[in-house]
Amino acid sequence: MSDRSTAEALRGTLDLLILKTLSLAPMHGWGITQRIRELSRGLLDVNQGSLYPALQRLEGKGLVVSEWTTTENNRRARYYSLTASARPDIAAEEESWRRHVEGVALVLEAV
Amino acid sequence: MTPQRRRIRLKDRLRGLLWQLRGVLRPTRVEREIDDEHAFHIEMEADRLLREGVPPDEARRRARVAFGGVERHRQAVREARWTWGIEEAWRDSRYAFRALAQGPLFSLSAVGTLAVGIGAATTFFSAVQGVLLRPLPVAEPDRLLGVELVRESGTPTRSVSLPDYLDYRDGTAGTLDLAAHHLSDVTLSNEGGAIAGLGLDVSSSYFRVLGVTPALGRFFAPGEADRVDAPAEVVLSHDLWEGRFGRDPSVVGGTLTVNGQALTVVGVAPAGFRGTMLGARPAVFLPLGLYGRLQGRDIGDRMGNEWLQLFGRLTAGTAPERAAGALGATARALLASHDYDGLGNTDARVSRFSPLPAGQRQMAGRSVLLLLASASVLLLVAAVNVAGMMLARASRREREISLRLALGAGRARLARQLLTEGLVLGLVAGGAGIGLTALGMRLVEGVRPPGLPGFGLDLPMDGPVLAFAVGAALLASLVFGLVPAYHATRADVGGSIKRGATNPSGTPGRSALVGAQVALTLVLLVSTALLLRTLEQALATDHGFDQEGLVLAEINLRLNGYDNDTGPLFYRSLLDGLRASPEIASAALSTTIPLGPGWDQTRASVPGLEPPEPSGWVVGWSAVSDGYFETLGFRFRSGGEPDRMARPPSIVVNDALAELFWSDDRPVGRTFRFNGQDAAVSGVVPTGKYRSFSEEPTLYAWFPLEFAYTPSLYVHVRPTRDPATAVAALRQTVASLDPHVPLINVTPLETAMAQSLFFQRTAAGFIGAFAAMALLLSATGIFGLLAYTVEQRRREIGIRMALGAPGAGVVGSVVRKGLAPVLVGLVVGAGGALLVGRLLEGLLYGVPPGDPRSFGAAGAFLLGVALVAAWVPAARAARVDPAATLNTE
């Protein structure tokens, strides 16, 4: 894989993680990083340098929408939620990711 | 991993797109949201750390560190939007506007300088378009061919007689649909009074060949307009119909009086159609065959009667060579069957038809091209000047630029920013330049050959003109945008911050720009000098008489019902009346004036001398009344005024003719054959200029008017004291004889004679103005460069003077530094002027294009201005106070 397609693959993975996280409930950027960390039991730590551009990209594509609301601590935060187009997209992405992992695992085990 | 795109619903995709556009439309708001979001992120992280037991200050610090570089994150978010490129360009231009608004003096002078250059170049682009490029508003102008015939002697001609035209028309049937046209002066009158204007005499085929259809009524019936007994009909131009008849459709069928003859109006030409002679706006179109009756001329002869110009429409699918072949064959057939006295035609050429009158084609074309070239040089000087200003500004901003580079701004980004500033400047100047072009076009339209009513260019502000202005603005902005941009990309990050602002970088570039300005300015100055020398030479020409103070007027009795018996009586009474007036010292009549619009020639020979052609030498001539030589102040070399009643007629000749015919130097009293009869020489006058200032010495003779009356004559009056009162006396005398006879074109004879210098005068005026502007720009360029250098070297100069250097030495060193690029510019400019001189060649008279006096004067003048411009900052350098300078460090 060239550098470029590696970056694209990683970006695709990050997009999937974000979308999956948001499928539970609307969340702000910091909440997304926390949730990914919790769900991966600390294995995955999303860098904010990639998170916010990714959110921009997803919003530009029409997969998420954002809205400024007040948090329980009375702070203004930007909450992201999925659009109607996002759910079938997540399903397809998940499927493709699973097959990718399966394939890699098979190769790793076989050799 | 992008196939999922297809599954995104249209509604969501549109929402995403709109969201992206917010970045362009509401940039500040979007930026603020990004910052707010980042701040929120850091706060939440700090809260989390606080909950883990970290002290508040430490928690905030660690949260910020964990987040990393704010600006880098900001940029990453921005770049995630595909609209970022547009946003950035928009941001750049707004920044450029702000930066330019911060230096209003700089911006205004730059915009003004450029706008003048763009306006001048665009104006003359539109003139070139109007004179040389724009096709006639007729059907398929590409298929129209102009006809040029070749004389037996090999010289080309474009004029033919009416009978010859009819033969050429019949001879080219099937290959070329041939038309003929001719421009003449007419007087139109109705109940509202009389106006002078232009009439275009046209063949029956004229409108058909052009594919023009009447706006109203009809054109001339086939064949009818070409007969000598053509019906008394007239077609109005659309302008006349609109301006004089208020678009009244009932004019068709009515009458219009042209040159005293009532003609039936049969139709109106379409709007925008102004005939086929560039610059002429004919008021009426007249049948060719009427010309004889309207102008009192016999047009039935083939010989010495060439007045029509030909053009035609090539038959579809025919090669132009076939048309030329048919014309040539007809010419040779005519030559075989008629006596042309050595002036017949042997061949023909065709070329794309041009509406420029044959005689003016070269001059007008050359003049507008020369003016476009000169205006472009001015634009270039302006662009180079602004480049120098931008560079100076960039040097002053060097600290800012270095700082931005040090803070991580990309060099490409900075260069783009500076280029954007150039483009913004250029486009604003382009807009202002288009405004100036509108003014310039009115100015050029107002430039009309004097004494020719109905002439003038039409210059519309059309697509190509606007495109040229925008193109010129963009090209100019490249010139002055790239220079500082290139300079910025080479800026040294550390040096300039450390040293402060005293780094005199950019001066080599600015010196080169000054040199370029000087070179370009010299080209304009030399061109001006050459044209002024031409005018000087021309006006200093010795015509053999004293034209100063003489008043000239034209009278045309043809329009007032005089015949060949009553006409001479009117003129006799006129001369007597004028001579009786105390305001008038002397008065006389002539058929032509030197360097005037008309030219008469005939043949002459002398026994014992073999002429080049059997019929004799070509001699120009004018018929003149008694008192002519006295009134004009001719200096007789020998002999004197002719005896009016002598037989054979008594005739005055010029030096050139006398020397050729009688080399023994005693011409007075000798006889020779002139115009088919004997004539005796009464006197010899110096050879003058008759048709153009640049002509070779020409044979010329003056014949008594008594033997050659024509109804249209020039009246010459030498005032006793004041030309104005003499003109009043002239008007009064004419009115007392016949109140219906108009005086045409009352003007000093000098002015009338200088009409042939029209193009030189016009070109000298415009190029001189361009040169003056370029000179001013160059001077400010030199001044700016040296003022800057002195400012930069203040410390060094202070030290030198503290060490005892004399003020004069300091001045000298500064001036020398300033003059180095000037001298290089002068050398390069002289080379350029030699090249431009070739464009000028056709306009110059008595001055070679490489005239050392013109080059010397222009160079010396420019050098003088450069010295003054360099002196001011140099003198300022000498006043540097060493102590004060050193203390500022």
Image (cartoon, coloured by chain):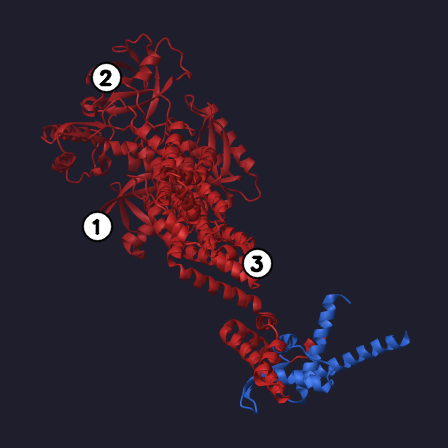
The location of residue B233, given as percent across then percent down, is 33, 45
Disc assigned to residue B192: 1
The quarter of the picture where residue B712 lies is: top left
Amino acid found under the numbered disc labelled 1: Gly
Establish if B337 lies above or below B185: above
Hue of chain B? Answer: red
Binning the other alpha carbons within 10 Å of mark 2 as few (below 14), some (14 to 19) or many (20 upward) gives some
Establish if B463 lies above or below B693: below
Establish if B266 lies above or below B400: above
Q: Is residue B672 left or right of residue B337?
A: left
Q: Do the residues labelled 1 and 3 touch (CB within 8 Å)?
A: no
Alpha carbon separation for disc pair 2 and 1: 49 Å
On the image, numbered disc 3 is attached to which residue?
Answer: B411
Looking at the image, which is closer to me, B831 or B214?
Answer: B831
The location of residue B444, given as percent across then percent down, is 35, 46
Hue of chain A? Answer: blue
Amino acid found under the numbered disc labelled 3: Arg
SS assignment at label 1: loop
On the image, numbered disc 2 is attached to which residue?
Answer: B636
The location of residue B503, given as percent across then percent down, is 48, 51
Quadrant for the C terminus of chain B in the image: bottom left
Q: Pinpoint the chain carrying mark 2.
A: B
Q: In this view, does B42 lie to the left or right of B804?
A: right
The quarter of the picture where residue B727 lies is: top left
SS assignment at label 3: helix
